[in-house]
């Protein structure tokens, strides 16, 4: 499905005509219709994505996920990837005591495979 087709489909689902999406995005006359035959400008696609409430990557076909993941930069909200954490940290502790390297390998293997052995 092309960018134009996705925009047309989502617009219809939201009850918008392509002309109204074009206008709400502040684009020139029939700009979206031009995307049937030519590659759209990123900034214009972003404006349309904002109007439709979807991600630019979805409209461009880079993902099947309609809505962008909101990353806040707050590990308490976004979570922490333990793989990255293990790689960035040197010595890890539990209850104030260093975790032996052998135990870290076991923990890592359990997290990676979901199996203890």
Image (cartoon, rainbow, N blue to C red):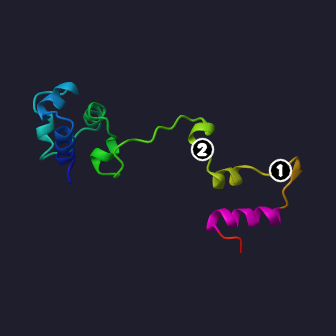
Q: Which residue is mark 1?
A: 93
Q: Which labelled disc corresponds to residue 52?
A: none
In-image side of 14 versus 66 (left or right): left
Q: Label 2 belongs to which residue?
A: 79
Q: Position of residue 8 (x, y in %)?
A: 16, 42
Mark 2 Cα shell of 10 Å, populated few (<14), some (14-19), many (≥20): few
Q: Is residue 84 left or right of residue 52?
A: right
Residue 4 seen anywhere in this rendered image of the structure: yes
Mark closest to the chain's N terminus, 1 or 2: 2
| Marks 1 and 2, how far apart at CA | 20 Å
Instruction: Kindly identify the residue that appears in the image at 57 percent across and 35 percent down.
Output: 73
Q: Position of residue 67 (x, y in %)?
A: 37, 42
Few, some or many residues within 10 Å of mark 1 (<14, 14–19, 20+): few
Q: How many marks?
A: 2
Magenta span? 101-114
Pick the quarter of the image with the N terminus. bottom left
Among the 4 quarters of the image, the one containing residue 109: bottom right
Q: Tell which residue pokes out farthest to the right in this image.
A: 97
């Amino acid at each position: 499905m092309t960018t134009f087709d996705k925009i047309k489909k989502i617009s219809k689902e939201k009850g918008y005509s392509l002309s109204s999406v074009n206008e709400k995005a502040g684009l020139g006359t029939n700009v979206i219709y031009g995307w049937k035959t030519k590659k759209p400008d990123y900034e214009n696609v972003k404006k349309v994505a904002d109007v439709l409430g979807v991600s630019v990557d979805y409209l461009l076909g880079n993902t099947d996920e309609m809505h962008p993941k909101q990353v806040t930069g707050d590990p308490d909200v976004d979570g922490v990837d333990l793989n990255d954490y293990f790689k960035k940290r040197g010595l890890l502790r539990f209850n104030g005591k260093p975790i032996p390297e052998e135990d870290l390998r076991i923990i890592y293997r359990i997290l990676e495979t979901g199996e203890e052995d």
